[in-house]
Image (tube, coloured by chain):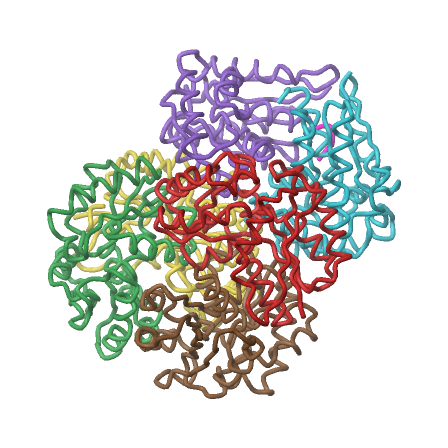
Chain colours: A yellow, B green, C brown, D red, E cyan, F purple
Amino acid sequence: MTRILVINPNSSAAVTAAIDQAVARLRVPGGPVIEVAGLAEGPPGIATQRDADSTVMPLVRWVERDGADAFVLACFSDPGLVAVKEAAGGRPVMGIAEWGILRAMTRGERFGIIALSPASVRRQQRYVRQMGVDARYAGSWPVDASAADSAGEAVRQRMIEAGQALVRQRGADVLVLGCAGMASHREPIEAATGVPVIEPSQQAVAAAMAAIWLQD
Amino acid sequence: MTRILVINPNSSAAVTAAIDQAVARLRVPGGPVIEVAGLAEGPPGIATQRDADSTVMPLVRWVERDGADAFVLACFSDPGLVAVKEAAGGRPVMGIAEWGILRAMTRGERFGIIALSPASVRRQQRYVRQMGVDARYAGSWPVDASAADSAGEAVRQRMIEAGQALVRQRGADVLVLGCAGMASHREPIEAATGVPVIEPSQQAVAAAMAAIWLQD
Amino acid sequence: MTRILVINPNSSAAVTAAIDQAVARLRVPGGPVIEVAGLAEGPPGIATQRDADSTVMPLVRWVERDGADAFVLACFSDPGLVAVKEAAGGRPVMGIAEWGILRAMTRGERFGIIALSPASVRRQQRYVRQMGVDARYAGSWPVDASAADSAGEAVRQRMIEAGQALVRQRGADVLVLGCAGMASHREPIEAATGVPVIEPSQQAVAAAMAAIWLQD
Amino acid sequence: MTRILVINPNSSAAVTAAIDQAVARLRVPGGPVIEVAGLAEGPPGIATQRDADSTVMPLVRWVERDGADAFVLACFSDPGLVAVKEAAGGRPVMGIAEWGILRAMTRGERFGIIALSPASVRRQQRYVRQMGVDARYAGSWPVDASAADSAGEAVRQRMIEAGQALVRQRGADVLVLGCAGMASHREPIEAATGVPVIEPSQQAVAAAMAAIWLQD
Amino acid sequence: MTRILVINPNSSAAVTAAIDQAVARLRVPGGPVIEVAGLAEGPPGIATQRDADSTVMPLVRWVERDGADAFVLACFSDPGLVAVKEAAGGRPVMGIAEWGILRAMTRGERFGIIALSPASVRRQQRYVRQMGVDARYAGSWPVDASAADSAGEAVRQRMIEAGQALVRQRGADVLVLGCAGMASHREPIEAATGVPVIEPSQQAVAAAMAAIWLQD
Amino acid sequence: MTRILVINPNSSAAVTAAIDQAVARLRVPGGPVIEVAGLAEGPPGIATQRDADSTVMPLVRWVERDGADAFVLACFSDPGLVAVKEAAGGRPVMGIAEWGILRAMTRGERFGIIALSPASVRRQQRYVRQMGVDARYAGSWPVDASAADSAGEAVRQRMIEAGQALVRQRGADVLVLGCAGMASHREPIEAATGVPVIEPSQQAVAAAMAAIWLQD
């Protein structure tokens, strides 16, 4: 029996629960066990770059000692993705930002990202450039929420407005949810904006399943 | 029971068989049926742009009339990908070039493509630019083979040499097989070059499975 | 006596007539005959990607059997441009999108395209990336018209507004007409926006004339 | 009777003669007069950036006082192109580098430039980036010749070798002659390399003819 | 005693004075003498490309005959930067646009430039592309002022509005003053927009000091 | 009296000493104190991404508690640059990779980086893309040395060969030393390759001095 460990690098139980629910559809008969767990020593949410960076070494150590067959880093900053890959000794490690963005590139010409905050926007700008996919990037739009807030109902309307701004003002034709906690809002935003909305944890877990089956 | 239809746009039975074998690992218990079929009216191989373009309308019509839950276009030119998506009425359609390249972007910094011919190289250059991922592209290297040849043993050594040239002279640190018929050579090339080698049909079928499960 | 065949890939007589009138200025004494003809089996207009792709093989076959000295594909999707070049056996083949865009790059820093529809916008985004000239592209703006409509007076005001939006909101300083049928609106849009407006069929035919004279 | 003034910004009579011969095919019956003249006060060749810059104000003043209908700046540095356009008061001004490169983009996927010297190479790198077409640029290769030398037979073999290096080592599939004096070598280099070779003065003059006829 | 010569390529005493004041903070004990001088034969301001180009040869000649240890060209067009470097015979030459932009890239993700006029905007677009840093460029916004005006109080409010437009509408998170005369407005614009504002003459002079000390 | 703290994030005394010597020229009378210190808990060298990431939180904490006026992170991975900037509370923080690369962009058209190892090469590829300056990047070439080795004489010849490969095979016309420990080799490599060689710690310290004086 193979197992995918999905790590929420923050300590918010609400976010961990949101991820768990988002990936439930991928718990198919005969498929790998999909375990979702939060990083107890992580910050309550990844707001600053320091928050993101503070999780890297704990993630590295967790992956090193955990026997899972594949890993998903379920924070849209993909914190420590390269270092964690080094630690995983050849086992697949998937970042949700990476996979959310790549999947979006197959559903539209220009993707926009619904971001938590202006600091997240700048982090995403750096990451999109690092990925080398700037030519497909319509931009990010902040909703001024924390990761924990992002799972709640109160933020949904702001997310819809952010999505509409990305579509109308920035020319996005596909959206990516820029936080693992936002998963429950995918369908309402899709309905309100009329464009596909990508939930990134789902994409990364699906990619981990494929990597296990394909042994690549 | 859901079903993925993988269409080889050429009429080469050797290539269709190679694809069928490549995706066998994804026929998991409880997963979708994965059916691989060749386009009877397709050319023997996709050598010229005309070959590629000649398959588009037959592919469109096939997808329109076939009740599959998702489709994979299993030619590295991704012929007619956008038109076929229009015809699929919201059902997922995956191109193997698109998914082979995107997966490669998660396994290395610069991907190289082992191509059939100089004409394929130019087609790939156009497609990589169209995808907007030129910053990650080390280049393509032709082996001067037809699609049908590509499944045979005779071409393997030339593919290894092409892979080595891409790594040493072009700075690739991950390779993509640039034809669906090349699947059986993945592991030997990986062994000979020391870098990951991506088999694109596998990636596209895995993506189709995910899209079915996630209904996105 | 040399001859350029300008093919309108759609079957709209209004569009064919608009092209014929647009290129009239290039019928210079001693110059090549410039023949403009519509593709009888083409769709009434190129709205979807399927529309565009459906014209490719008919265009390939026409060019193969026609003895013209050079060809112009007069649809802003440049449908089948590479395949038609293969079929032309070394005779020049010019796409109007390609030449309209290249000429615009000599008249301003950032070109905008007046597009028929949102689907055209996405097709143009793909094509501009494929051409590798994204750094010069201010964007496309749709007027929600069919190709046949585009030749009429009713659409002119919407085209002017699209041009103004591209200049003011997207920073364009030169505009390209994104449909061969729009030719008659060039001067009014230029007057209303204050920036150069490029009629692409004219540019492609002029390029074909040069290629004939230069034998390159 | 309309007239195009082609200005060679250097004072080399050999280069002026080479340009004159190159554009002779464009002296068609009923077409504009094509006058080719050298800048008497120009340097013997454009080797340094200072050489290029030293010609700008003389070119500006010449264009201001000359009544020609269109102008071509026949030096591959396109010296002063923007300032000369300002001085031309709306009359077309074409740079040969600009048009040589744009035409090359319609004949292949990646263009290489045969350059006079390492300093020319760097100037071309800057210009290609400024044009925003870097994604199509295979590179430049110097032949270590002066502009005046470039018209002679002695340099031809070095130009062929440069072209072959661009094709084989840099992946060019179309070449541009990087000096107006190189025109007579176009066909031999084409024969030796097997890829199209673009003579840029021809392209710029053809573009000027089109601009006159189209009044754009 | 080493000396840096800062040349204002226009003849506006107000601009020269603004530069002199801006760089005063860099006149540190034991540091190089920083001399600021205007080009007497320069135009009153650099409005057109012709204005910019007209200063190049005078700058070249000045630098050639002046014994300074390093030079700064204090016009945001960096006129003749490469030719002046050739003339300086290995002594450092710094352009203020170049250094203002590079410094901005260390203070934010996307820089915007407050420009004098639409013509300056286009010049900046070309220069940013030439520098190859387009991926970091949010755009330029004109205030419709001359260089001499730019030092005065009257233009400050328009500069603040331009800065706010770049931040809010173009997504800039750092601003560069696009004229050497604007130096006195740096802090008020920073206060009003909430993002860092770079004064480019300061950056170029500091870079010249470093080059002297490091002898590189 | 102001003070710049230059932190070598690894624990190699040889590298710390090399940095100290490299920046000695910038200890000018009346200038800031330039203190160079190693991170005692850092790894012996930054070889893997994990090495780099392991230094981030120690650097953040050091900067937070240290009263220096400006900081330089003297490892070519610029580890934790953004997080350290957050921790510095507005005081300038300079990364040596960032400043070495930016300075190189003013000395040539295409910079190459002499790297320690293949893993460094990939890290540099990511960072150059993240900076958005890929269009100016000729590539990196590894010398297969550790950071501590890099300060010794034994590696100099391999660095010269790497520099020559970057110039001849990759078209670099300026080189950057890709490790703080390589400082003593700058001049010999410059002599051997004939192109400028940038020592990055010097550039970052000079930039920190400027930031202190300019209070920006």
Task: Characterize the magenta stretch by its predominant secondary structure.
Answer: helix
Q: Residue at x 30, y 63 (%)?
A: B49
Q: Residue at x 61, y 76 (%)?
A: C186
Label total for image: 0
Residue E207: name its quadrant: top right
The front one of E57 and F161 is: E57
Indicate whether A84 appears above or below F209.
Answer: below
Q: Is A173 placed left or right of D28 in the picture?
A: left
Give the image location of residue B68, x and y in percent: 22, 73
Per the rendered image, the range of residues in magenta is: F212-216
The front one of E134 and B152 is: B152
Q: Is B36 placed left or right of E120 in the picture?
A: left
Indicate whether A69 appears above or below E92.
Answer: below
Q: Is C190 placed left or right of C200 in the picture?
A: right
Residue B37: name its quadrant: bottom left
Give the image location of residue C24, x and y in percent: 55, 80
Give the image location of residue B85, x and y in percent: 33, 71
Q: Is B184 placed left or right of F22 in the picture?
A: left
Give the image location of residue A126, x and y in percent: 51, 45
Residue farthest top in this picture: F153
Indicate whether C43 appears above or below C196.
Answer: below
The front one of F209 and D122 is: D122
Magenta span contains residue C47: no
Residue A18: in sight, yes or no?
no
Q: Residue at x 47, y 61 (%)?
A: C214
Residue D72: in sight, yes or no?
yes
